[in-house]
Amino acid sequence: MMTDSSLPGDSSPRPETASNRQWGLVFNDLSRLLLLGVALLVMLTFEDYGITNDEEVQNVYGIKLLAFYASFFKDMSAFNYLDLFRYGGFFDLLAALLNQISPFGEYETRHLLGGLIGVVGLAGAWRLGRHLGGQRVGFLALVFLLLTPAYYGHSFNNPKDGPFAAAMVWTLYYLCRVIATLPSPPLRLVIKLGLTLGVALGIRVAAVLVGPYLAAGVVLYLFASWRENRDAGAALRRFGVLLRRIWPAAVAAYLLMGVFWPWGVMSPLNPFEALRDFSKLPINIDTLVAGIWVKATQVPRDYLPDYLLVNMPEFVLFGLVSSGAAAVIWAIGRIRHRDMFPGATTVAEMRRIQILVLSLAAFFPIVFFIFYKPTAYNGIRHFLFVVPPLAVISALGMDRVWSGITRFNDRLGRLFATALTLLLVTQGWVMAQLHPDEYVYYNVLTGGVKGAQGAYELDYWGNSLVEATKDLAEYIAMENGDKPITRVYKVAVCGHRLSAAYFFPEYMEFTKNLEDADFLVAFTQANCHRHFEGRQIISVERFGVALSVVKDRRYLKNKTK
C-alpha cells in the first residue's frame, strides 16, 4: 500500500517505492473511474430532484443578468431585483444561457448543471488531496466528499452554496500549489488561482477569505525563509519577488468576478457592502437546533458546530479526529524542541504550511461563526464551502491511521481497509435510500433521520414535494381507472408553490384558496402539514420519517355544500 503521508507528525515525505507507485496508479485510476461514474449518475438522476424555495428567484436573476448583456448594458433590472444583486450570478447566468438551447425543462437544466458542477467540486477535492498527501489521500478525499450527503444533495438544486463550495475547493487547490512554489510561482498557476477565485467571487463575496488564507501562507513561508539563514534582507527580497509574481491573480479574479457579478464592480465599495449585509441578514425566520426553535438572528454559538457534528458522516468525523490528534502530537514535539514554527523552506515544511492553510480555510469560518454569531438557518447550507476542505483533512487523517496500522501489522492494515470499505459501502446504501433527498441525512449521533426528527431541520427546502406531487397524480389517475380524466382537480400547497405546481399534469391546477382545494400537498417542515384539515392519503418517507404528505379535502368541500 502507498504510505506517503504529509501530516504534521511526519519528519519528511517517505521515499516512493515501486509498490507505492503501483498503488498510486491504482488509486488514480479508481478516482478517474469514480468521477466518470458519478457524472453518469448525475445525468441519469438529475430529473428526480425538486425545486427548492430559492430557485425561482435565482432563475429570474439569471434571466435578468442575461438581459443586461443582451441589451448591451441597458437593461439594469437585475440590479434592483430583490437583494440578489448582492450575489454573484455565475451559476444563474450560465443556467440562463444553457436554457436557450437545452432540450430539458427550465429547472431540469439547472439541476443537471448543478449536479455536474458538484462533480467538478469532487474532482477538486481529489486533486487537492492528491497534491497534499498522495494518490490514496486524493482517492479518500474524493470518496469522503461524495459520500457526504450535505454536499451531494445540495449540488443539484442549491444554486448558490453548492457551486460556491465547488469553486472554493478548486481555489484552495491552486492556492496550495502557488504556496508550494513560493517565492516564484509559475504564471500559469497564478492565472489559474485568479480564475478559480474569480468564479468563486462571482458566486458569493465570502470568497474574499482566500486573501487572508494566502497572506497566512506567505507569512509562514517568509518566516521559514528568515529562519533558514537569518537573513531578513533575503526574506524581504523574496517578498518583493512574490508580489511581482502574484498580482496577475488579483487582476484575473477581479475581471472574471465583474463578468458574473457586474454590480460588484460598479462601485469599489459594493463587495464590502455585500459582505457587511450578509454577515447580519435581516431574516428573522425560525430555525431548529437541538429540538429548540430559535430566531435566525439569535442562533446559539454552537449552532454551526452542532449541525456539522451531526451532518458529517461518521468516517469523516473519525478522520478529522485523527488529523487533530496528529496535529497535537506534532505541536507537542515542536514545543519540546522549541521549534514551533517552520524553520526551513524544504518540501516537507512547505507541505505543512499548505496543510495549515487548508486547516485555516476549513476551521476559520466555524470559529468566526462561534464568536460573531451571524444570521444562520437551514442547517449548514450557508457554510457548505467548509465541507470539501474538511473532507480533505479527514482523508489525510484516515490515511495516517491506515499507514500506521499497516506498518505495525500488514494483516491488520488489510483488515482496517476492509472495515473502511464496508463502512463506505453502507454509507452509499444510506444515500441511495435517501435519494433524492440526500440532504436530510443525519449520522448516528442523532440516531439517523429518525432520531433527528423534531430536533433538527429535515426537508427545509421542500425537495420532497415533487415526489408527493407525482404520487398524487398517479393516485388521481388510478382513482379514475380506465376512464379519461375530464375534470380539473384544484390543489393547494403548503410550501413553495412552484415546488409542486411545476410538476402538475394538465388535470391538476394550483389554488391559493384552501376552501376550493380538492387536495393539499404539504411538506412537514415546521409541522406545516398539521395546520390544515384533510384525510392523509400519501406520505413521502425516508427511514420512517414523513417529509411530505398529501391530504384529500374533497369530503370537507362536500360538507359545506
Image: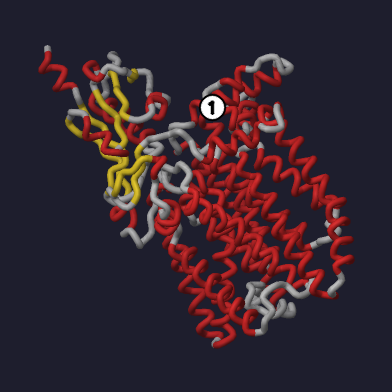
User: In the figure, is residue 496 to the left or right of 110?
Assistant: left
- Compare residues 271 and 75 and report the one nearer the observer: 271
- Compare residues 271 and 320 and report the one nearer the observer: 271
- Compare residues 229 and 50 and report the one nearer the observer: 229
Quadrant of res 51: top left
Task: Name which residue lies at 81% across and 70% down.
Answer: 226
- Please state, as top left, top right, bottom left or bottom right, where the N terminus lies in the image: bottom right
Task: Name which residue lies at 60% across and 17% down.
Answer: 77
User: In the figure, is residue 153 to the left or right of 291?
Assistant: right
Q: Find residue 107 and report its horizontal and vertical position in percent.
A: 51, 29
Q: Amino acid at mark 1?
A: Asp
Local crowd size for mark 1, using a 10 Å CA cut-off: few (<14), some (14–19), many (≥20): few
User: In the figure, is residue 179 to the left or right of 520?
Assistant: right
State the residue lying farthest toward the front. 232
State the residue lying farthest toward the bottom. 408
Task: Name which residue lies at 45% across and 68% down.
Answer: 422
Question: Can residue 473 be seen in this snapshot?
Answer: yes
Secondary structure of residue under mark 1? loop
Q: Find residue 507 and report its horizontal and vertical position in percent.
A: 33, 18
Residue on which the image places disc 1: 83
- Please state, as top left, top right, bottom left or bottom right, where the C terminus lies in the image: top left
Question: Can residue 18 be seen in this snapshot?
Answer: no
